[in-house]
Amino acid sequence: MTDGPTDDQLTSQIRLDLEALYRAGKQDFPDKAEDMSGWGTTLGTLLDDAQAQAAKAADVTSLVFNDLQQTHYLLYEAVRACVLTLNDCAEGCLAAAAQLRQEEDTSGEAYAGLSGELPWLTDDAPAPQAPEPPARPDPTA
Amino acid sequence: MPIGSFKDGGLEAFNSNADAIERVLGELMGLELARDYADRDQTIGMVGSDVEWNVPSETNPFLIVVAVNDPSRSYEEAVSHVRGQFQTCWDNGRSWATGIADQVKRYGKLYGDVDVKALADIAESLESRVALQLSGALTGNWSYDENRGTDLETTLGNFSGQFAGKLSAFYSNVGDRANVWATFASSLAAGYAGTAVVIDRCRHDMTEWAIKTRRHCEAQLQNWADAGGFGILVMQRGGSVDGAETLLTLSKIVNFGASVASLFPPAAAVAGPTRTVSGVVTTILEHTGGDAERPVTLTAQESLEIWGWEDSGGGAQHELGHEIIDGCTQALDELRQGSADGGPTGTADVTAEVERRVSDGSWYAPRPQGMSDPDPSDLWYKY
């Protein structure tokens, strides 16, 4: 039978996990969501541009343009949805961190130490949310 | 050969050349009919009273002279008769050519008003601003701080319950999905680039065809004018005194679509690892270099042979309708269907593969429900 972690070890571990969750929720997921939002916006603008060209196309090119528009739209939708999920995950990480703070007896001490060191990471501000690229109609529908 | 669709004045110039081709071919046919008439009419020759006829060419007016010796008519009647016959031949020639310009212009509209430079820009932006950025962007354990010794993957492993499981599943899978999207963005860019090049090549060839065919017809008309005077009597059927020969430099478009499709990243093979997607668009846009040229020489000198027949080989009509237009249509079809050597590579296959992934749930990144508001009973800290 092995002994469990000491209070100091537990406090240290909780502190590491709190920091990882706060870092993910406040910084890393929002940064990735912001990147994904930018790529989604670019994809959307290019989809608009491509639709403008497809509208000028004649019958002989319509099949190729239909393929391209459909792939382009589904790619846009995937990236757009990913922005939402990354935003959600950022919130989720902060929510998990908040819950961990309350869950263990030693969490208060771990949080106090961490927030004293990294107040910007552990304050109660919500997770930054990257803008979701707007919904677009399916160009081939 | 850089993208530069419809060189030398665009569709307007193409249509203008189509009008000129119809006009000059009609004039050539008119002269040929007049020549045939003069050849048949025994009263016409080089001996007798001169009959001058001003060829009413809009392109290149000149004077024809024949001699008439017709004992059955007075000189005035004979002159009037010959001029009338020439005019009828001329009118019949022009009538024969009516409709050629409309036929050519219909081909000009086949590819619409697509701006191929804009299409190429879309392809380049997709590759550089989306595909290359997405590739590898979320791969691995990216939420970490090396100096602080923290990373999300380890932390999530310290929790159990559905919440942590869902978050962990998203975190570990989103990188692979982003790589897949990068690869398909690259295929999409290749598709736009290939389409731009096929349309551009077709327009280039149509422009080259129109300019050179017009030039060939006008050169032949000039031969008639140069023969001058009694020239109508020396211009031989099937060959002039100084035949025109015109070289057209066209694109080697056959198999182009398949070769473009072969550059697509293999859609079925993309699973997880980052793919190199750089340079595909540039390769395609620069694909038609000097080695992809297809020289065609127009040598026919009679209007009927110059214009030719659509279905059979030879003649400008066949070259435009069958070789250029059908060749580009085939290239577009190859671009859609891909090469026959296996693997989904054409635009249709790429789209089908994306739709398959949508259907089986492997296209979108997993969307963990309840992520923003976890249930406390569903988040267990292991320690």
Image (cartoon, helix red, strand yellow):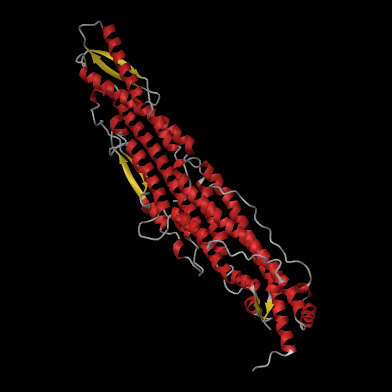
The picture places residue B22, in percent across and down from the top left corner, at: 38, 29
Up-down: is B144 above or below B74? below
Whether residue B38 sits left or right of residue B348 in the image: it is left
In front here: A95 or B370?
B370
Whether residue A130 sits left or right of residue B206 in the image: it is right
Quarter of the image containing the C terminus of chain B?
bottom right
Up-down: is B157 above or below B363? below
Up-down: is B10 above or below B282? above
Residue at point 72%, 77% (across, down): A18
Quarter occupied by residue B345? bottom left
Residue at point 58%, 59% (across, down): A78
In front here: A11 or B185?
A11
The picture places residue B236, in percent across and down from the top left corner, at: 23, 28
Quarter occupied by residue B133? bottom right
The picture places residue B328, in percent across and down from the top left corner, at: 39, 45
The picture places residue B181, in percent across and down from the top left corner, at: 54, 62
